[in-house]
Amino acid sequence: MKAIVPSQSSRTFTEKTSKEYHDQLDDEALAYLTGPERMLSEEVIARYRLGVVRSPSPGHESVRGYLSIPYLTPFGECISIRFRRLGEGPGPKYRSTAGDIPRMFGTEALQRGTRNICVTEGEFDSIVADMCGLPAVAIPGANSWENVWRRLLVQFDAVYMLHDDDEPGRELVAKVANSGLDNVRPIPMTGGDVTSFYAAHGRDGLRAKLGA
């Protein structure tokens, strides 16, 4: 089993590679990230160091053409990269490095000193929430919850679960609540997910959904 804390050599490789993929961002990748499917600002694209794999590092040949999503520590160091297919097409939509373990995305938000935190089902949804002034972390998929993560969320007055409006989303809420947390507040994203709700209702609408 891969170690929770990557080795120094692994961290050095991942940090270097994440920066290279960010530098490889081109018009196609930026059009997808800033366009109607994701609606991300160039500021958050840079802050989260999103990239695209045009010239793969050794071992990443299978994700050529995928978007890269770095998992950054609160200190800005990349310790893992997840990959998302650019647009639609054959093959898995998401890929991870062989042997990597599920991690919580956006952990910098845990250390902002806020009393509440949002949790989304995917990385891009958490970035949208953050773009709206709602500190958020992400679970990498509805089936990826790890009970150990409750230790990161128990400190908050409220954990707003901005869950997809479907059965897997509701099951994720149940998993999180059943992990021993009594501060979970389910907020269904009516009709879809955080990104689609933001597309329909804008920044003010998403914040109003939480009473912010």
Image (cartoon, rainbow, N blue to C red):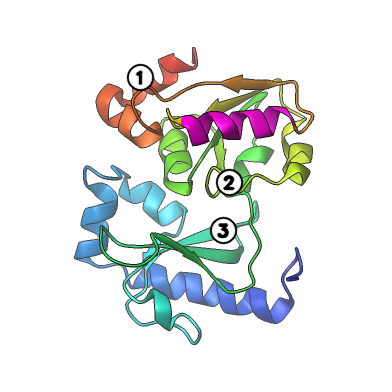
On screen, residue 67 above or below 180: below
Question: What residue does disc 3 label?
Answer: 71
Asked which quadrant contains residue 37, the reply is top left
Name which of mark 2 and mark 3 comes first in the sequence.
3
Q: Specify whether residue 35 is in view.
A: yes
Q: Kindly identify which numbered label has been placed on residue 204.
A: 1
Q: Amino acid at mark 3?
A: Tyr
> Relative to 11, is 193 above or below?
above
Quarter the N terminus occupies: bottom right
Quadrant of the rendered structure where residue 149 is?
A: top right
Instruction: Measuring from the top left, give residue 128's x and y in whole percent.
Output: 40, 38
Give the SS element for disc 3. Answer: strand
Give me the residue at 58% from left, 57% from top: 72
Query: Which residue, given by chain and number where applicable, does mark 2 sit on?
Result: 143
- For the residue marked with disc 2, what is the amino acid? Asn
In the rendered structure, which amino acid carries the disc numbered 1? Asp
Q: Is residue 138 left or right of residue 67?
A: right
Distance between mark 2 and mark 3 Cα atoms = 18 Å
What kind of element bears circle 1?
helix
Residue 98 on the magenta span: no
Bounds of the magenta span?
Answer: 167-178
Identify the secondary structure beneath mark 2.
loop
In this view, 45 is above or below 22: above
Mark 1 or mark 2, which has the lower sequence index? Answer: 2
